[in-house]
Amino acid sequence: MVAAVIRAKICDGLAALVRGRDGSATVAASDILAHDVVWNGCHPIGRLDGAGTVVEKVFGALRESFPDLERRDDVFIAGSFGGSQWLSATGHCFGSFEQDWLGIPATGRWTSLRYGEMYRLEGDRIAEAFVLYDLIDFMRQAGVPPWRAGLGVEGFTPGPRTRDGVRLKASAQGDTGTTFDLVMSMLHALFAPDRQTMGMERFWSPRMMWYGPAMIGATRGLDGFFRDHQTPWMTAFPNWSDALDAPHFADGPYACYAGWPSIRARHDGPLYGLDPTGRTVDIRVMDWWRREDGLLAENWVLLDFPDLFMQLGVDLFALMRERAANRRAER
């Protein structure tokens, strides 16, 4: 069980890393990051080794582009997996986008960056990190989306309806166990061989909300979930295998799962307008769920689309740069 003092320390430290100036970020990093931390970022950030590199390449680069950057967690939970203690968070950073970041053209306007994080702890410091950003939504806000819009509603990702997602104290074990069992039963049904009879209504509230990343979008209810995400996804990837040995845990009414990768699948059907390639891909996905009245009421999802499409032979960043160049030429 992750102690309350460690939860609060890392929650505050991550916020300080985002807004840090004049060496304060280095101080914050030394307080919450192991010196030899391994940081696994989404494409194109990739793997970074060591706290100093993380401060420079991740947080320093963000602060150069966003001089007034802030961080707000929607979900911040802790638990145990594989003999280690873990923390997980999702929410938004936001600020004035003043300088290009990762080649995405600055707008000079308020912009938000949705994040998902999974951290393995050693003592009171982060030893290993897995971090996804919704970079496609970020490109959309910058006016240079590289692909067509999702079937759901893009850019709509509120925090929990109950406003209790930041869990700085350990939850009751019974409550945690109930959530964990519900989520695991749902995942086993989702990955069952006979996917036409999943029986998802056993696990989800009729008023459930599913908050997907850009290129999918948010949707409501199981009908919306299957229409806007699951059916197109199963058409594109009818043959998949799960990675339920990836880090996953629960904390009160919340649970999370983050595979690096989560799914191995063969691209045998059209995917958002991309013709089948027949390639086998490893897909990075992060999920957070909230349980209410015995059913799953909300689900926040992030997916590393730039990495997935690179495996399928499509460079979404190159398409973004091409769109940005065309926009400049039109002015």
Image (spheres, rainbow, N blue to C red):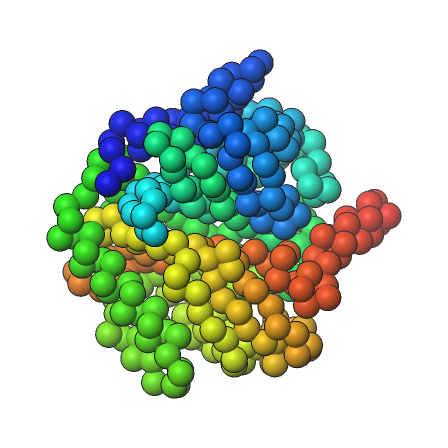
Q: Tell me the residue at 52%/21% (across/down).
A: 25
Above-or-below relation of 184 to 191: above
Name the side, left or right, on which 312 lies relative to 137: right
Above-or-below relation of 320 to 126: below
Picture coordinates of residue 178, whole percent (x, y): 18, 59
Total marks placed: 0
Residue at the extreme top: 22
Q: Tell me the residue at 59%/36% (across/down).
A: 49
Name the side, left or right, on which 179 lies relative to 14: left
Name the side, left or right, on which 331 lies relative to 154: right
Image quadrant occupied by the N terminus: top left
Picture coordinates of residue 221, whole percent (x, y): 34, 69
Q: Tell me the residue at 69%/77% (across/down).
A: 277
Picture coordinates of residue 137, whole percent (x, y): 58, 51
Above-or-below relation of 197 to 229: below
Image quadrant occupied by the C terminus: top right
Query: For residue 220, which quarter of the picture?
Result: bottom left
Above-or-below relation of 289 to 49: below
Q: Nearer the viewer, residue 170 or 35?
A: 35
Q: Tell me the residue at 59%/26% (across/down).
A: 52
- Answer whether residue 103 is visible to the viewer in this image: yes
- Answer whether residue 300 is visible to the viewer in this image: no
